[in-house]
């Protein structure tokens, strides 16, 4: 796949992760010299505190969503890692870690990107496209009437829009595998990956037949381009999805992959999860423990105190938008009055971290060289216990 392809050099407002100029496939591949496993270990020691266990964000922004405030190129991410962001809690880690660790962190962050990212949607008037073969060249010569960044994995068409649309983004193949792009759309749709035609779907085109066998991709970053001609009053979305052969496809119906799902809720009724979110009135480093009985306990590892607790609760997340790290998320639910207090671990405790043990959250401290733990467990349908 050494084919040269069209350069994408579009920059949107500074808040949006910029689309960088992409030239050849080689420049798109992840830096394999750095060690993503080392990066992951460092992430789990330091970064998770603000960016979340799953990189879903918390005090700091999500690191696997479509928006990079400071740019998505390797250079731009490296700059943030090395120098930090002045006036924020993101310090420069160049002063903390040696260069190869910074490279490993970068490599880990890139390896966690998955699927379609940094999508930009451009609309064109119908007149130039009617009856013509949909090709990248045909679009390249036209001025778009409207262009905007959209949430990842959301291929939508305005109701009553009759015209042509192109979507540009990056596709992160998350492992070496056979990938499938399966598209169904009213109108016509053509997909390119790194400038190579992948599939044609819709009226007058074969329905992605060649993809029954799948498309072998190496783990890495590819330029994705989807060209679409829509009929007025057709359905809102291009349906279908992409993914690894033999596994459930990630659907193109507009649900984001991570970070921007509107609610942070339990996915497994038997397991607790912990979130860190900026919530009004809760200290920034509090652990928000979501227990399987839908009780949320906000515990501060700094003070050792329960700050608040709610029943029938969920977290309404800050959407994954450029300004997301400035607007707090909200806990929905009924506040528990006089929530059970935490046992006192004394003033010499040092927070070590937390782990999840099925329905319990275990918070680890060191106290005078000894390890201590507090366990938060669900009780009944609307309460919890916290014990040593
Ligand atoms: C004390 C909290 C904190 C810790 C710890 C922290 N960060 Fe951050 N980080 C932030 C905040 C807050 C921002 C957003 C800064 C801003 O307003 O632009 C940020 C921004 C970033 C960005 C830029 C994101 C973007 O959208 O452009 C990256 C990348 C990043 N952090 C990676 C890391 C890594 C890797 C680590 C661990 C070595 C780490 N951070 C540790 C708080 C933190």
Image: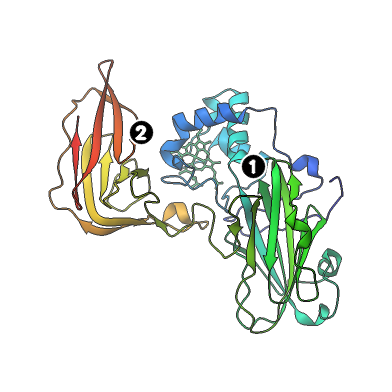
Task: Name above or below for residue 63 compared with residue 324.
Answer: above
Viewer-closest of 272 and 158:
272
Residue 68, image x, y percentages: 58, 50
Residue 98, image x, y percentages: 58, 22
**Disc 1 target residue:** 76
**Disc 2 target residue:** 355
Horizontal relation, residue 55 to residue 99: left or right: left
Going 70% across and 54% down the picture, which residue do you hit? 180
Could you say which quadrant of the image residue 116 lies in? bottom right
Cβ at disc 1 under 8 Å from ligand 1: yes
Residue 158, image x, y percentages: 61, 77
Could you say which quadrant of the image residue 152 lies in? bottom right
Earlier in the chain: of badge 1 and badge 2, it is 1
Residue count near mark 2 (Cα–Cα under 10 Å), binned few <14, some 14–19, many ≥20: some
For mark 2, give the secondary structure: strand
Q: Quadrant of the C terminus?
A: top left
Cβ at disc 2 under 8 Å from ligand 1: no
Residue count near mark 1 (Cα–Cα under 10 Å), binned few <14, some 14–19, many ≥20: some
Viewer-closest of 287 and 197:
197
Could you say which quadrant of the image residue 139 lies in? bottom right
Horizontal relation, residue 326 to residue 312: left or right: right
Q: How is the image coloured?
A: rainbow
Going 79% across and 58% down the picture, which residue do you hit? 210
Task: Name above or below for residue 387 compared with residue 275.
Answer: above
Residue 55, image x, y percentages: 49, 43
- Asked whether disc 1 touches disc 2, contact meaning CB atoms under 8 Å apart, the reply is no
């Amino acid at each position: 796949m050494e084919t040269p392809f069209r350069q994408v050099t579009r920059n949107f407002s500074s808040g949006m992760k910029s689309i960088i100029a992409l030239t050849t496939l080689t420049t798109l591949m992840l830096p394999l010299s750095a060690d993503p496993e080392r990066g992951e270990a460092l992430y789990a020691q330091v970064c998770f505190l603000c960016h979340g266990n799953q990189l879903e964000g918390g005090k700091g922004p999500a690191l696997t969503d479509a928006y990079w405030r400071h740019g998505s190129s390797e250079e731009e991410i490296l700059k943030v890692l090395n120098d930090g962001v002045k006036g924020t809690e993101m310090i420069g880690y160049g002063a903390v870690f040696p260069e190869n660790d910074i490279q490993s962190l970068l490599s880990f962050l890139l390896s966690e990107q998955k699927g379609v990212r940094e999508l930009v949607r451009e609309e064109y008037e119908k007149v130039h496209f009617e009856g013509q073969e949909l090709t990248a060249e045909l679009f390249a010569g036209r001025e778009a009437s409207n262009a905007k960044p959209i949430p990842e994995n959301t291929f939508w068409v305005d109701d009553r829009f009759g015209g042509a649309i192109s979507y540009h983004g990056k596709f992160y193949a998350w492992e070496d595998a056979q990938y499938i792009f399966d598209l169904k759309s009213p109108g016509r749709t053509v997909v390119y990956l790194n400038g190579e035609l992948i599939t044609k779907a819709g009226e007058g085109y074969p329905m992605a037949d060649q993809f029954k066998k799948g498309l072998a991709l190496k783990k890495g970053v590819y330029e994705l381009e989807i060209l679409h001609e829509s009929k007025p009053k057709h359905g809102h979305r291009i349906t279908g999805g992409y993914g690894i052969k033999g596994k459930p496809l990630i659907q193109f119906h507009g649900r984001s992959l991570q970070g921007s799902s509107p609610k942070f809720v339990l996915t497994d009724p038997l397991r607790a999860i912990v979130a860190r979110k900026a919530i009004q009135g809760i200290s920034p480093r509090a652990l928000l423990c979501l227990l399987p009985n839908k009780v949320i306990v906000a515990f501060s590892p700094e003070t050792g105190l329960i700050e608040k607790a709610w029943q029938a609760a969920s977290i309404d997340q800050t959407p994954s938008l450029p300004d997301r790290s400035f607007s707090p998320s909200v806990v929905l639910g009924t506040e528990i009055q006089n929530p059970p207090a935490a046992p006192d671990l004394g003033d010499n405790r040092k927070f070590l971290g937390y782990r999840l043990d099925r329905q319990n959250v275990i918070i680890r401290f060191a106290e005078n060289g000894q390890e201590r733990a507090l366990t938060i467990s669900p009780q009944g349908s609307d309460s919890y216990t916290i014990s040593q």
